Image (cartoon, rainbow, N blue to C red):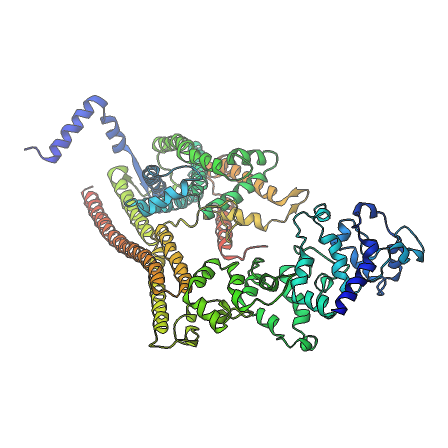
């Protein structure tokens, strides 16, 4: 009787004959990960990818029950939470995994910035990564409205009103996104289509590009490590690095399970467009630093509305972030760039402090 | 009788010249009355001109001559010539007829406010105020201007109006809460004080419910009179219709009438009606049944039985609500179960209403329906807490499996790296 190993070898041989799998094996065997004191940061990309896969899996399960209309959305989520076996678990994991994914994506972004992994020849990898982070935030913004509960409704109303402040195109963009002058059933169906079709399509393309480039260009060794004589060794991606990745993924899975069991996603009251906005309307945490900044801006800055200046400032910051590899060229030449490191650290501190203030500071009148 | 005839004939003579209601449109241009009287400023002769600017009649285009007569186009003192129909300030007894010239004419009133009733004068004649004034010549009682101050009359919907629901008690209390003024009538003067402590005033003043009753809703406004013992229930029944119907059919309605007890007010008071709670029921402290019944008599037993039933539903409701709140705090979705618990709330309200039939069976019927709802909700709560435990157990098992896998991976990594 054939052993499992023998059976597996048989299947492999059968597939190899038809698909030339030896190429894949070759790639896997050749792929190596440099070992140095910053190697730990290499795991963040894989962790973000793992959480994205969880999002896809749980998102598909939620689609089985979700009904995208102002009349049914809330009730369908309520039914899912109360009646469907493990419905609460899938929704809670979807919600928590979304937050963790954006958190790890931010960590990944800042680690890449500080380790200068964006420098030549990885500029396109960097750009695709920044765009993927933008897509992740768009996933969060559109997904937040879908349960059609009170908090989500009013947070989306505030969010789209902020968008209106963008000069010239703002009101038009907000109207197109909402499907009208205010958040309504039309907004829900639009957000749904964007959340489950448009964003996944764009993400698949960009993620494919991002992973292809990572595979093609390999892992970047930080300039300071290179200056000190390079990595102290190399690790096979398969299986050594992948197994370590698996440890991280399993740990993330355990954390997700605990969060879902102890802090399941709440549903709250159904959205009522005619009800007054409840107190404490806040965006998701990853938008908080921007929301709080807009609150601190004066009503007018010179001849412009403070909010419009703030939004244009963030748009400019996003653009600068996107073209960082072309602005910061010293590390590309192997020269130290301490000023840039301090700017990045300043941005991190700014985001952390403003996010903290967003939750801790008294609401402004 | 002689007084009544004199007042009646005098009034008719004086008002004869004003018999036909004036047309507002014909008085729109500024009158000579205003041009002279406004020169008096805040003095008594000037005050009416200032106040009248905000009067509802001024808003509709009526001028001074509509009530006072005279010739508004005459710039001299001859404008106030009785020959020109001038009557000056009408006496108190004349006021009713004066206002009634327009307000009792449906034909006239529908041109300005078709929804306004035109039976105020007829009602007034039936009121204690009207009878005192028109039959006994008592000029101290309220007449139209007692409640609707002349020259500054505003519609009841105006918050500044003396007859806005929030101001009615104050308006009536300006006489009825004044012991000195009311001394000749030998009636209590604590109604306003008591009313201001009642649940009705609380609903109106604190919760903004302007449909809550104030003086005129129970006593009538133009036909104001204290409700008779036999028809108090009808007054309260305007709003509390189900309770009034149940009470009307009950044995108590007949007994109360026989004893001269004023229906609802026997248990709930009249002006200082408090929020009716379950403590009113039974024979314990604060229970009103104990005023007539005691333990051992059949009425006392029914009272205790009804109270026990309602207490039981209350207790089951609290238990179900508490277990569902616990489950909800634990993150279990129980909104459907909480919605189902609303049936128990409805049953509790119905049971409290059924108390007014004084029938144990009627109360029991409602309580049973409520208990069925609380029992279902409690079971859903227990199920939810069970689910909570299963989640915890599931989490523990999952984490254990994951930890075992992680440990296995560590061993595998070590093995691989030892080999290389």
Q: Is residue B283 above or below residue A297?
A: below
Task: Write the residue at 41% across / 67% down.
Answer: B251
Q: Quadrant of residue A171?
A: top right
Task: Write the residue at 76% across / 53% down.
Answer: B57
Residue A83 percent across, percent down from the top left: 30, 46
Please state, as top left, top right, bottom left or bottom right, where the N terminus of chain A lies in the image. top left
Tell which of B157 and A120 is nearer to you: B157
Q: Is residue A183 above or below residue B146?
A: above
Residue B341 percent across, percent down from the top left: 36, 55
Extreme residue toward the top, this view: A18
Q: Is residue B193 left or right of residue A231?
A: right
Tell which of A113 and A5 is nearer to you: A5
Mark count? 0
Question: Can residue B402 be seen from the camera position used here?
Answer: yes
Q: Is residue A111 left or right of residue B198?
A: left
Q: Is residue B198 left or right of residue B59?
A: left
Please state, as top left, top right, bottom left or bottom right, where the C terminus of chain A lies in the image. bottom right
Residue B128 percent across, percent down from the top left: 65, 67
Q: Is residue B289 above or below residue A241?
A: below
Q: Quadrant of residue A174?
A: top right
Question: Can residue A118 be seen from the camera position used here?
Answer: no
Q: Quadrant of residue A302?
A: top right
Tell which of A161 and B266 is nearer to you: B266
Task: Write the residue at 45% across / 35% down.
Answer: A189
Residue B320 percent across, percent down from the top left: 33, 59
Q: Is residue A208 left or right of residue A113?
A: left
């Amino acid at each position: 009787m054939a052993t499992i190993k023998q059976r597996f070898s048989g299947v492999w041989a059968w597939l190899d004959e038809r698909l030339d799998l030896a190429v894949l094996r070759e790639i896997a065997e050749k792929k190596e990960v440099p070992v140095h004191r910053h190697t730990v940061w290499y795991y963040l990309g894989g962790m973000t990818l793992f959480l994205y896969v969880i999002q896809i899996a749980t998102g598909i399960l939620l689609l089985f029950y979700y009904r995208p209309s102002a009349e049914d959305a809330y009730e369908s989520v309520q039914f899912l939470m109360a009646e469907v076996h493990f419905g609460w678990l899938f929704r809670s994991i979807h919600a928590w995994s979304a937050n963790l994914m954006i958190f790890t994506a931010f960590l990944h972004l800042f680690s890449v910035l500080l380790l200068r992994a964006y420098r030549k020849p990885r500029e396109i990898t960097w750009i695709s990564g920044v765009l993927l982070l933008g897509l992740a935030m768009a996933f969060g913004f559109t997904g937040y409205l879908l349960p059609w509960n009170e908090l989500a409704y009013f947070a989306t109303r505030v969010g789209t009103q902020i968008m209106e402040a963008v000069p010239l195109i703002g009101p038009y963009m907000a109207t197109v996104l909402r499907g009208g002058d205010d958040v309504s059933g039309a907004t829900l169906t639009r957000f749904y289509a964007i959340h489950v079709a448009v964003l996944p399509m764009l993400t698949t393309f960009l993620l494919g590009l991002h992973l292809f480039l990572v595979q093609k260009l390999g892992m970047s060794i930080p300039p300071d490590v290179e200056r000190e004589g390079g990595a102290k060794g190399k690790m096979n991606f398969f299986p050594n690095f992948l197994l370590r990745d698996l440890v991280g993924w399993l740990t993330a899975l355990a954390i997700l399970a605990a969060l879902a069991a102890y802090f399941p996603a709440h549903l709250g009251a159904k959205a009522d467009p005619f009800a007054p906005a409840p107190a404490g309307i806040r965006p998701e945490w990853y938008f908080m630093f921007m929301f709080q900044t807009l609150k601190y801006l004066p009503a007018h800055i010179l001849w412009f509305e403070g909010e419009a200046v703030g939004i244009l400032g963030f748009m400019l910051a996003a653009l600068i972030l996107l073209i960082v590899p072309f602005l910061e060229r010293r590390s590309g030449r192997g020269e130290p760039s301490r000023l840039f490191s301090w700017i990045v650290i300043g941005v991190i501190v700014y985001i952390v402090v403003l996010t903290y203030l967003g939750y801790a500071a008294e609401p402004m009148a | 009788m002689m007084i009544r005839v004199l007042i009646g004939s005098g009034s008719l003579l004086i008002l004869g010249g004003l018999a036909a209601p004036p047309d507002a449109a014909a008085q729109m241009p500024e009158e000579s009355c205003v041009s002279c009287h406004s020169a008096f400023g805040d003095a008594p002769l000037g005050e009416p001109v200032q106040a009248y600017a905000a009067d509802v009649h001024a808003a509709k285009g009526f001028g001074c001559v509509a009530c006072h007569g005279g010739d508004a186009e005459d710039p001299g003192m001859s404008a106030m010539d009785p020959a020109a129909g001038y009557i000056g300030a009408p006496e108190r007894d004349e006021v009713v007829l004066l206002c009634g010239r327009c307000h009792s004419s449906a034909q006239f009133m529908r041109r300005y406010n078709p929804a306004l009733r035109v039976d105020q004068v007829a009602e007034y004649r039936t009121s204690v105020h009207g009878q005192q004034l028109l039959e006994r010549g008592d000029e101290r009682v309220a007449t139209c201007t007692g409640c609707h101050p002349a020259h500054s009359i505003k519609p009841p919907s105006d918050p500044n109006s003396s007859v806005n629901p929030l101001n009615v008690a104050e308006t009536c209390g300006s006489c009825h809460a004044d012991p000195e003024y009311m001394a000749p009538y030998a009636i209590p003067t604590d109604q306003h004080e008591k009313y201001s402590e009642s649940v009705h005033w609380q609903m109106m003043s604190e919760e903004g419910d302007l449909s809550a009753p104030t003086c005129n809703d129970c006593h009538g406004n133009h036909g104001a009179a204290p409700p008779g013992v036999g028809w108090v229930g009808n007054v309260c029944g305007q709003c509390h219709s189900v309770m009034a119907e149940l009470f009307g059919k009950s044995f108590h309605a007949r007994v109360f009438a026989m004893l001269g007890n004023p229906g609802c007010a026997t248990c709930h008071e009249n002006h200082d009606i408090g929020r009716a709670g379950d403590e009113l029921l039974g024979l314990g402290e604060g229970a009103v049944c104990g005023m007539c019944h005691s333990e051992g008599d059949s009425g006392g037993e029914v009272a205790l039985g009804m109270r026990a039933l309602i207490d039981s539903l209350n207790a089951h409701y609290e238990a179900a609500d508490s277990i569902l709140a616990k489950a909800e705090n634990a993150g279990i979705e129980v909104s459907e179960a909480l919605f189902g618990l609303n049936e128990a709330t409805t049953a509790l309200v119905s049971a409290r209403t059924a108390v007014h039939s004084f029938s144990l069976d009627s109360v029991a019927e409602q309580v049973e329906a409520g208990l069925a709802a609380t029992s279902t909700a409690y079971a859903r709560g227990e199920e939810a807490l069970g689910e909570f435990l299963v989640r915890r157990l599931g989490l523990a098992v999952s984490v254990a499996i994951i930890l075992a896998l992680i440990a296995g991976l560590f061993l595998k990594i070590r093995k691989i790296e030892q080999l290389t």
